[in-house]
Image: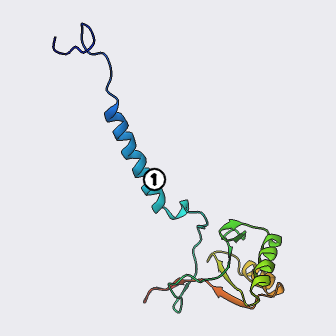
Amino acid sequence: MAGSIRGKGPIADINVTPLVDVMMVLLILFLVVAQLDDSARPGALPIQLPRAATATREAPVAPLAVTVGADGKLYLRGKPASETQIQAAVASALASDPDAEVAVAADRNAAHERFVHLLDLLRGQGVVRFAVQAEVAEVGRGG
């Protein structure tokens, strides 16, 4: 009775164990790849910072991070925000620390006027310390 487990006749069941193993490996691969993608991280913005020879590689340690996107939209801690929301967050940060620093960044294609407007907005709220973010310029590379 070779090839028969239950009763008489050939085995008609499909063994799904290898299929489950393959699906589990694919799931693990997708999870690992998703963690490596910068755009999948919360707070990551697809902006291109301007290059500066004196820029540092260390990320600024500031309670607030405000960004101007290439399209001129404002972001607070990586999330879209209105000027009113930014003003409220700045007021809250300054209430707990009057010398609070704000990290500001702007896409290299953003209008200069929009960046200056953001700085004016922050200074109007009482911010006097800024950390302007830039990409480190490589030697011999124009930018």
Q: Residue at x 50, y 84 (%)?
A: 57
Q: Is residue 49 left or right of residue 118?
A: left
At x 80% / y 83%, what residue is drawn? 95
The residue that appears at 64% across and 85% down in the rendered structure is: 132
Name which residue lies at 43% across and 89% down.
139
Task: Provide the secondary structure element on which disc 1 rests.
Answer: helix
x and y, in percent, of residue 32 in the image: 43, 56
Q: Amino acid at mark 1?
A: Leu
* View extreme (left): residue: 2
Q: Is residue 23 left or right of residue 51?
A: left
| x and y percentages locating residue 135 in the rendered image | 53, 82
Point out residue 66 in the picture as x, y percentages from the top left corner.
69, 76
Residue 42 vs residue 85: left or right? left
Q: Is residue 93 above or below residue 33?
A: below
* Coloration mode: rainbow
Q: Point out residue 31 in the picture as x, y percentages from the top left corner.
A: 45, 53
Q: Is residue 55 above or below residue 48?
A: below
In which quadrant is the N terminus drawn? top left
Tell me the residue that label 1 is attached to: 31
Quadrant in the rendering for residue 126: bottom right
User: Which is nearer the eye, 134 or 2?
Assistant: 2
Q: In which quadrant of the rendered view does residue 24 lie?
A: top left
Near-viewer residue (30 or 45): 30
In the displayed structure, 118 sits above or below 72; it is below
Q: Is residue 4 left or right of residue 81?
A: left
